Structure formats: structure tokens, C-alpha cells
Image (tube, coloured by chain):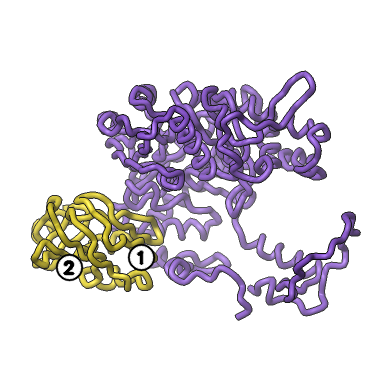
Amino acid sequence: MNFPAELKYTKDHEWFKDLGNDTALVGITDFAQSELGDLVFINLPQVGDEVIADESFCDVESVKAVSDVMSPCTGVIEEVNTELEDEPQLLNEDPYGAWIARIRDISACGELMSADEYEAFVQK
Amino acid sequence: MKLIFEKGAPGQHLSLMPPCDVPEVTLSRPRTEPLNLPHVSETELTRHYTALAKRVHGVNDGFYPLGSCTMKYNPKINEDMAALFSQIHPLQPEETVQGCLEVLHESEKLLGEITGMDAMTFQPAAGAHGEFTGLLLIKAYHARRNDAARTKIIVPDSAHGTNPASAVMAGFTVVNIPSGEDGCVDVEALRGAVGPDTAGLMLTNPNTVGIFDRNILEITRIVHDAGGLCYYDGANLNAVMGVVRPGDMGFDVIHLNLHKTFSTPHGGGGPGSGAVGCKEFLRCFLPGPVVTRDEAGYHLTVPEHSIGRVKDFYGNFSVVVKALTYILTLGREGIPEAARNAVLNANYMMKRLSEKYAMAYAGPCMHEFVMTLQDLKDATGCSAMDIAKGLLDHGIHPPTMYFPLIVHEALMVEPTETESQETMDEVCRVFLDLWDLAHQNPQALHDAPTRTPVRRLDEVGAARNPVLRYTGE
């Protein structure tokens, strides 16, 4: 299981990469993708959507189930990774490369953990 | 196995077409291409579907404990009764179909008595369609009172996925509330969630994990006090039919899955029937037409503030005939007895499987129970999926898997009342043997099934690259 040190993590298993200027990339963690199993569909947010920390902004579907993806922060969707629409398996193959959305104008964040804290959290 | 389109040859056809008994017409825009239909003889056609039938597993083949689906035996007398109504047409004049209208009227009365509702529509084709219809009634009720602020439907996180989906389809916003540790509604969370924007609450009771929510009267009171209505998802009615009534629990609108609880065939398309019942104050909003009665007989009428049609004609009428047959066959004593036996059977299996399998919630349960195989997976690498595939090799349909979502590695078992103790003993033995096999030879379970017509299917491939129709390629 991979926990890159430069990322922050939520208890709902999303990662958050601070790009500066109140902008960040978000995605789902390695742990999340392994728990969900093979992903077959992603319902991406739309550019311009306002998202709220700890509220659902996207959902992903595996053979098992549909799961909400929660936003780590409050802000506005600047860009979405449309590659995932055709290749949701990228979320399984490269969870930290397969970002879901770039969020701008971030005004608040939910509770975020460091890589060490998150690793301890998932091993509980 | 070949598809029907890949069999036969041009010129082969069915020779036993009945004579045409309606006037022939000339279409203003005739087809320019011939229909792409299989060219097969009646023999070939019959053999094809018989071969397919041999490869499927239905409740007539063996144990089918698909949790939340109530795969009970469907008595064959239901089919005999439905066949009596095969020579009618939905556009026939009212006075020539009084018997059919009586079936609908009688079914409404009996199901109303079982559920504590005052009025019912049989139009919705299945459960989720019923949910949607029920929510439209709630919407119409608030709109009629000029209460435009009520835009939110509260749904617990253990709910069937169709609940929030139906609410969104009906134009509501969904508010999710967490379940307590016992799988029941967190009453304090509910209290915090209701307000002037609450349109209603959707709930099943017993709930999705097979537990009867003992706070139900308080739950419905909280929603009513806030000005919302309470919707009962009838998915789990089999556990309580004839014993307690949703109407007495405080619910205003319900849907029933006649195809589950009232023993009509389902799975693979049914057809189903998602009858929707309501209290008197919502009757005026029901989809039309509904059956009313006066001295002259039965009539089809449209309620005053009807939300309109939700399906053509009167719904899946023959399914209602079968459900009515079931109710009349079991009668006042048989209906609650069936419910009690469904609960007894589930508890019997739960107790026996507890010998090795971990239960997600402490017993006793209602009509179904949920096991969590997380520990088994951690210890052996065998998942709920592997156990499910292993069951196939023993001629047993797997339980519902990976649902409810709040339980990890979930297997949800609903034996129903129509299984004997001997059958359940045998199934429990298989379950316990598979547990041992997971520890002794996990690879054998990863490789399962081996005795089925096809081996493990590529579910991911099927979801990512579905082939939904024959293209000739």
C-alpha cells in the first residue's frame, strides 16, 4: 500500500495535493481503490461546480457498488480529468496519478491527515 | 452456445400462425428494410429456450437465499388463476370487464388491510417505480399546500440504493443520515436533520440488515412533527405481513413488491408490480384511473388531483391476479404464519452459521441476516465473492453480496418461509464446509465455480465493455 508523503488525506480515503494559490488536485487513495475493487464507471463533477468540504462531489462505481467521493475542501471545480470517463481503471492502476479534479478558490478544508497519520488510520 | 440469431437458416419459420382476426391496414410509411429476426423452426426455437432454461437457476431448481429479494416459492395455482384472464383487452368497455375491476378493488381492500393503508394504485411496474410514484404523491401533497420549501427527503445510509435514486428522480434533494451501531436509525441524527425543508423520510422496517427498528413510532413522529411525510419501502414486508402494519407504524405512503412478498415470479424481468398504498388524505393524488364502486358496479375513475398516469392502463394486471390468489389461498391465518416462518427460518440459519461465520449484527434477526466475511478474507484471502462462487458448485444460488454497503464483505441471507428444515440443514453444511475449505485450500475457492455451465465470469469486462444487443458480428 502506497502513501506518498507530499499528499494530505481524508478519513474518507481521498487524497489532496496542494498546488499553491488556493488550488489543489484531488483523487482517491490506493487504499480506497483496493477496497472498492475494479472500477468500471466514474460520474465526474462539472467544471464550475461549487464543492463543499466533506460533501460528495463525484461518485465511482465498481462491480460491487457505487460509492460517493467526498471533497476534501470547499472551492470551485477548475478542471476534471476526463480521461477517467473512458478509462476508469486508471483509478485502480495509478490512484495518485489519476487525479479526479482540480479545485480552485479553496476557502476551507476538512480534516486532513499526513501520510503517516493516514497510514496509521487505515491500519486500524 | 449459439445465440438464436446464429441458428436456423432463411426460410425456416413457424408454420402455426393463427388466422388474422383483425382488419389489415396499409402503413403510410412502410418499412424499407426487413426486420432482423431469427429464421428458425418451432422445433429449433423450443429447443433453444429449453437449453437456456436448463442453464439457469430459479427457485424451482434449488435454494435461492438472495437477501432482500424474497425468492419464495410461487404457488402454481397463481398461474392457473392468471390464465383465466388471458382473453381480455385493456381497452374493453368497463361493463364487460367488471370481474377484472373487482380483482383490482378486492386486492386494494385486502392489501390495504395488511398494510394499514386506505387507497392503492397498481400502476407502478416494480419497486423503484413504486418509490418514484409514492414520492410524487408526497410532492403533490406539499405543492397543494403551497409549501414549496419542502425539498428534502431523508434516507438512512443503510437504505436500498433505489431510495435516494428515486428521490432525486422525483426532484428532491437527498439527506443521508447514519445508522446507529445496531443498524437502526440514529434518532438524534434524525432529529437534527428534520426541519421546515423536510418533505419526507424513506424507510424500510425491518431495515436492510434484518432488524426491526423499535424506535419506529418515535421516528415517524419526529418527521410528522417537522411537517414531513413518512414513506415505507415494502421491500421487507415479508417479515411482518399480517403481524404489524406500516400504517400503524406511522407511515403515510408505501410501496409493495407484489412480486416478492405476494409470490409472483421475479428476477430476470418479472414482470413485477410495485403497488403504492396511501392514507386517506393522499388518495386524491393517486395516479389514475383507480377502481371505484357504486350500486351500478365497478368504475374506472381518475382521482381529483391525480399526479397522472405512471404506466399505461392498470399496471401489470396478471401479477395482481396472482398476488390476490396468494392472499386468498393463505387467508387471515396463513399470511402472518408465512411471516413468522420466514423469521424463524432466518434465525435458524443465522444460529447454525454463527458456529463459524461472523454476523454483522447480534441476533435475533427478522426475515434475513447479514454476515461479514472481513475476518475470513483477512485470514485466508477468500472473500465473500469466493464463498458465493463456491456455493454455485453445490447448486445453491448465492446470497446477496456486498450489500448493504455499511457492512464489509457482506453476505445477506434470506431463506424465506418456503424452505424446509432439511434444505436449510444441507445448505448450512455447505456453508460451513466452504469455510473450512477457505482455510485448507483457498485456491480451490478462488477457482470456483467449476461445475457450472460457465466458469467465473469477467464481471469487470462485462461492466466496462457491455455488449447489449446482437449486431451480426
Q: Quadrant of residue B21?
A: bottom right
Asked if residue B287 lies left or right of residue A112, the reply is right
The answer to whether one can see residue B326 in this image is: yes
Q: Amino acid at mark 1?
A: Leu
Q: Position of residue B2 (x, y in %)?
A: 65, 74
Rendered view: B53 above or below B129: below
Q: Quadrant of the N terminus of chain A?
A: bottom left
* Residue A39, disc: 1
Describe the element under mark 2 as helix, strand or loop.
Answer: loop
Total numbered labels: 2
To which residue does mark 2 refer?
Answer: A2
Depth check: give the residue in front, B134 or A37.
B134
Closest to the observer, A64 or B276 = B276
Q: Is residue B219 above or below residue B19?
A: above
Q: CA distance from mark 1 to mark 2?
A: 18 Å
Task: Tell which circle, 1 or 2, labels the residue nearer the N-terminal end.
Answer: 2
Q: Are marks 1 and 2 on the same chain?
A: yes
Q: Colour of chain B?
A: purple
Residue at x 32%, y 41% (from the top left corner): B175
Residue drawn where x is 25% and y is 31% of the image: B192
